[in-house]
Image: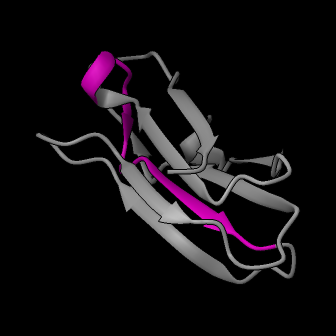
């Protein structure tokens, strides 16, 4: 991500048949990146936001939520509001898991 340029990354996620939950966890500054204000958002196919989480100094962004009824694809949006003056890295990592409890 290049937050100074307003970069946002979008990933299309196919919901596996029969899976009813989605778990998302990410990290940026907490793993040494210079990204600040890192956030993820999950949206339905129509663009409606249904989950969002920011990174804090003590917590990585995390959500474990029900897949909205009837959705076969979701969008994961990643963004950052700034870049550290002291750390040049602009990387992140995320994991997405679909499951049925």
Residue shown at the point (47%, 66%) measured from the top left: 52
Residue shown at the point (46%, 16%) measured from the top left: 89
On the image, the x and y values in percent for residue 84 come to 32, 32
Q: What is the image's colouring?
A: one colour
Residue shown at the point (39%, 29%) measured from the top left: 28
Closest to the observer: 56 or 89?
Answer: 56
Q: Quadrant of the N terminus?
A: top right
Query: Which range of residues does the magenta coloring cover?
Result: 30-44
Where 31 sits versus 49, above or below? Answer: above
Closest to the observer: 20 or 39?
Answer: 20
On the image, the x and y values in percent for residue 87 come to 33, 18
In the displayed structure, does residue 89 sit left or right of residue 11? left
Where 100 sits versus 31, above or below? Answer: below
Q: Quadrant of residue 59?
A: top left
In the displayed structure, does residue 44 sit left or right of residue 2? right
Q: Quadrant of residue 96?
A: top right
On the image, the x and y values in percent for residue 54 come to 35, 56
Q: Is-magenta flag for residue 41?
A: yes
Q: Is-magenta flag for residue 67?
A: no
On the image, the x and y values in percent for residue 27 come to 39, 31
* Total numbered badges shown on the rendered structure: 0
In the displayed structure, does residue 101 sit left or right of residue 60? right
Closest to the observer: 32 or 62?
Answer: 62
In the displayed structure, does residue 38 sit left or right of residue 23? left
Residue shown at the point (58%, 57%) measured from the top left: 21
């Amino acid at each position: 991500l290049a937050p100074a340029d307003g970069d946002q990354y979008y990933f299309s996620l196919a919901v596996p048949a029969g899976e009813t939950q989605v778990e998302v966890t990410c990290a940026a500054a907490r793993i040494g990146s210079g990204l600040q204000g890192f956030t993820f958002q999950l949206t339905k196919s129509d663009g409606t936001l249904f989950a969002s989480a920011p990174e804090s100094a003590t917590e990585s962004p995390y959500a474990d939520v029900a897949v909205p009824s009837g959705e076969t694809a979701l969008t994961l949006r990643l963004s950052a509001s700034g870049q550290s003056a002291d750390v040049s890295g602009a990387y992140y990592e995320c994991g997405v898991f679909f499951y049925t409890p």
